[in-house]
Image (cartoon, helix red, strand yellow):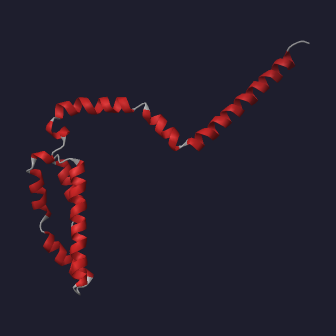
Amino acid sequence: MPRPDFVELRTELLQSGISPGHVFRAITELDEHFEDLVFAEIEDGSERATAERNAVVALGDLAEVSRAMQQQPELKSWAWNYPRLARIVYPLACIVALPAVPVIAGVQNASLLARWAVCALVGGFVTALMFLVLQLAISPV
């Protein structure tokens, strides 16, 4: 029997409105508990495949975990509880954060931006020099 499908559980919990923080914590704890069960079985002398089968049985049905979490309203995200407010707040937050995107990208790619700026400066200087040479070539002395 393979490992429990925590990805499916994660998707189900998020789609049911459980806060991402609570989902992350629950999945992490379930995964750690599964590993602890497998480790205990291996220490008792079981093979890895047998230990994983026994750990899956000991862990129980993940659908029950999902139902139990979905029945607790305090685990729901605020956007799930107030969808009208979320439709206003999320776009406004994106508009507010939008000017920060170039700054963040600039900080992460500072060396590329520095090279680009130097190339643009050199290109502008060469172009200005060519215009000066052309101006001097066509103007009467």
Which residue corresponds to the image point at 85% horizontal and 16% vertical from the top-left?
Answer: 138
- The answer to whether 18 is drawn above or below residue 97 in the figure is below
Residue sitting farthest toward the bottom: 45
- The answer to whether 72 is drawn above or below residue 124 in the figure is below
Left or right: where does residue 124 sit relative to residue 15? Answer: right
- Which quadrant of the figure contains the C terminus? top right
**Residue 98 horizontal/vertical position (percent):** 40, 32
Which residue corresponds to the image point at 25% horizontal and 83% vertical from the top-left?
Answer: 43
Residue 35 visible in the shown view: yes
- Which quadrant of the figure contains the N terminus? bottom left
Which residue corresponds to the image point at 22% horizontal and 31% vertical from the top-left?
Answer: 87
Residue 129's image quarter? top right
Residue 2 visible in the shown view: no
Residue 56's image quarter? bottom left
Q: Tell how many labels.
A: 0
Which residue corresponds to the image point at 22% horizontal and 79% vertical from the top-left?
Answer: 40
- The answer to whether 28 is drawn above or below residue 107 in the figure is below
Left or right: where does residue 64 sit relative to residue 122? Answer: left
**Residue 3 horizontal/vertical position (percent):** 23, 70
- Which residue occupies the foreground of this view, 91 or 130? 91
Residue sitting farthest toward the top: 140
**Residue 111 horizontal/vertical position (percent):** 59, 44
**Residue 10 horizontal/vertical position (percent):** 22, 56
